[in-house]
Image (tube, helix red, strand yellow):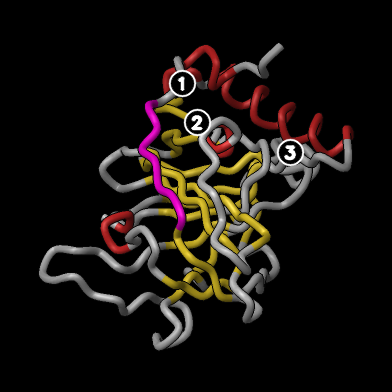
Amino acid sequence: MFEQALHLNMIVEWRDKRGPALETFGEPTGFGLQDRSRMSLFTHPQSHAHQMVHREGPGVNTNCQFLWWYPGSVSHVGISGLDVLTGPMSGCLLVTFRLDGIVHAGHLGTDIDSVENTDNAWDAWQDWAGLNAHDVVGGFFPAKHWSEHLPMPRPGEAGAKIFGLMTAQGEFWSFLLYQQIRAGIFRVAGKWRHPSLPLHEVIRRPG
């Protein structure tokens, strides 16, 4: 699993290079669940582009899919045997659900700068999940743990970023990274395995 490759204090490279949607699921102006997958750009500094080559021995999966998030919509991708990494996170909900018999990982694109985007993302998810509750598998808020358990940065570090991981084995993880002096270089300062929220809290918006 990908989380085995990300050790505490490991130095990784992250560059935000998101691209256009690969395809739209359902009616573009209706259903609102969109497939925005990309292979990972979350890499070891000496790796080739788009994949991690840091190895810790047989059986450690250092490849994953990267799922971009987009304000106001629900991005998702089939897990298909590869863990799904997404972020950076603020207060978004990550979900897993079955679509046409395949488990998908999803990222609700809520937006701290736009009530409209946040409402649109939640409405798209609630409309679908309310009609397909039997296909909702789980969900979690990756940033919530770190609001109460923030590790101290080292001298010269700044700009904490949080990423969420949904594994092919059904586990939920989050990682907290601190920006180093060189742009795009981060240290893994924390990792945490999350239990799923109760399904009724995954399907319906809090409050």
Q: What are the residue bounds of the magenta stretch?
A: 189-195
Residue at 45% over, 45% down? 174
Measured as percent of width and height from the top left, residue 19 is found at 68, 71
Quadrant including the C terminus: top right
**Up/down of 3 relative to 197, above or below:** below
Callout 3 secondary element: loop
In the picture, residue 128 is in which quadrant?
Answer: top right
* Sequence order check, earlier mark of 1 and 3: 3
Determine the residue located farthest toward the front in the rendered image. 155
**Amino acid at dot 1:** Leu
| Disc 2: which residue | 140
Callout 1 secondary element: loop
Q: CA distance from mark 1 to mark 3?
A: 18 Å
Callout 2 secondary element: strand
Residue 207 is left or right of residue 23, and the answer is right
Q: Dots 1 and 2: beta carbons under 8 Å? A: yes
The dominant secondary structure in magenta is strand
Measured as percent of width and height from the top left, residue 204 is found at 62, 16
| Disc 1: which residue | 197
In the picture, residue 198 is in which quadrant?
Answer: top left
* Sequence order check, earlier mark of 1 and 2: 2
Which disc is residue 110 wearing? 3
Residue 132 is left or right of residue 15, and the answer is left
Q: Dots 2 and 3: beta carbons under 8 Å? A: no
Which disc is residue 18 wearing? none
Residue at 75% over, 47% down? 28
